[in-house]
Image (cartoon, rainbow, N blue to C red):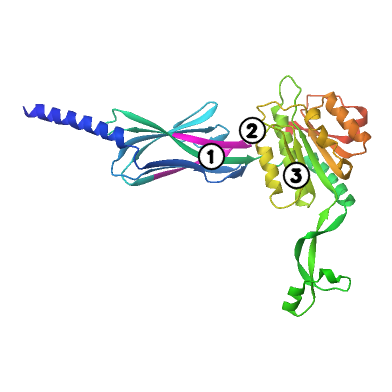
Amino acid sequence: MAVFWIVLGALAFWVLQNKIYQKYWDKDMEAGLRFTENTLTQGDNGILEVWVENRKFLPIPALKVKFQVSRNLQFEDTKKVSIVTDQYYRNDVLSVRPYMRHARKLPFAAAKRGYYEVHSMDLVASNFFMSHEYPKTLSTYSQLYVYPRPYLDGTFLQTLQRINGEVLSKRHLLEDPFEYQGIREYSPFDTMRDINWKASARTGDLMVNVKGHTALKAVRIFLNLEDGALLRHMVLLELSIRMACGAAQLFLQEGIRTQLYTNGLDILTGKTSGLEAGAGAGHMETIQKILARIDLEQKAPSFTQTMEDAVFANNAQEVYTIFISADTQPDFQQMLIRCLQQKMDFVWICPRLAQTAERIEGILEKHVHFVDGEEFL
């Protein structure tokens, strides 16, 4: 008889705990994940933080925490709790005690430039006897920009330094009446309107405003990611993106106003991108974000059709233009010949593989600079 009551009691307890877990396991349960850094550069290391918090008395004997991110973020996986296919799938099992916060920091390497998001995670709880599982999907959001690593090597750097010298020698500097860099003591050549009367009254000496300067000369970078080959040269396209990043970095460090246009499609908007000239704080970061979000899984539209208005803008003769293009199709070369006819200052930087031989129009030969893509592999 005693055995009967023991079995009956155990059965009742099994049914009761199952109902309790089914109804209350996710009550006062919170979880989330986030990248500890919002931006990284290709090749850098980062951390994804995953946390679970149980704010109730009921323990969770086994809680599976599942999520997926891009496989371009290479996680350290010493416990073999993940699967890598088109995405990185991770499945951690935790034991969460009452009123406990459990957090893990998962290191990873940012192997490839890009824009990465995590939108959700799955929790799967088990009851006390682990006889049933209770799944739940949580909405969570975190984003990460992986900027392209600037390419500034070999003959490419020499070409940029030559362009930099030409731009610096040709540009004129004008006072910018809206930008002040500080104050200094009055000199005989200063005008009365430059005097800062408040500072003069405070110091007892005449002080004048020091104005900033703005450059008339700017640099335009056109990044052509069109690829007419039967088999797309992804290596050359990635190299082109890194070149654009390196060129922008070099010119902005010299204080040269820089524009960027590309026919690469943005992974968020699905459109081509363009950025007007600037040299202020945050301009390089904006360029890096544009380059990070280029989606090479989508074929870029025709460069000559999408970029013609920007290339032949009214101020085209007042700026130095850099075309970065591994594509050598005839329509692109005809566009460059038109640039010559309109007396634009430009250079065509063409990354290529050693085994390829492009046909370049004779009139363009002195304006093209080849970069060996084999060095990039």
Residue range in magenta is: 102-121
Q: Is residue 89 left or right of residue 205?
A: left
Residue depth check, mark 2 versus mark 3: number of the one nearer the observer: 2
Q: Is residue 205 above or below residue 97?
A: below
The residue wearing badge 2 is 267
Single out the residue that lies furthest toward the top. Answer: 230
Residue depth check, mark 1 versus mark 2: number of the one nearer the observer: 2
User: Disc 1 residue type?
Assistant: Phe
The residue wearing badge 3 is 248
User: Disc 3 residue type?
Assistant: Ala
Task: Reply yes or no: does residue 180 show up in magenta.
Answer: no
Predominant SS of the magenta segment: strand
Q: Is residue 146 left or right of residue 151?
A: left
Label 3's element?
A: helix
The residue wearing badge 1 is 108
Residue 169: x percent and y percent? 89, 51
Residue 101: x percent and y percent? 38, 46
Q: Is residue 256 above or below residue 267?
A: below
Q: Is residue 120 left or right of residue 237?
A: left
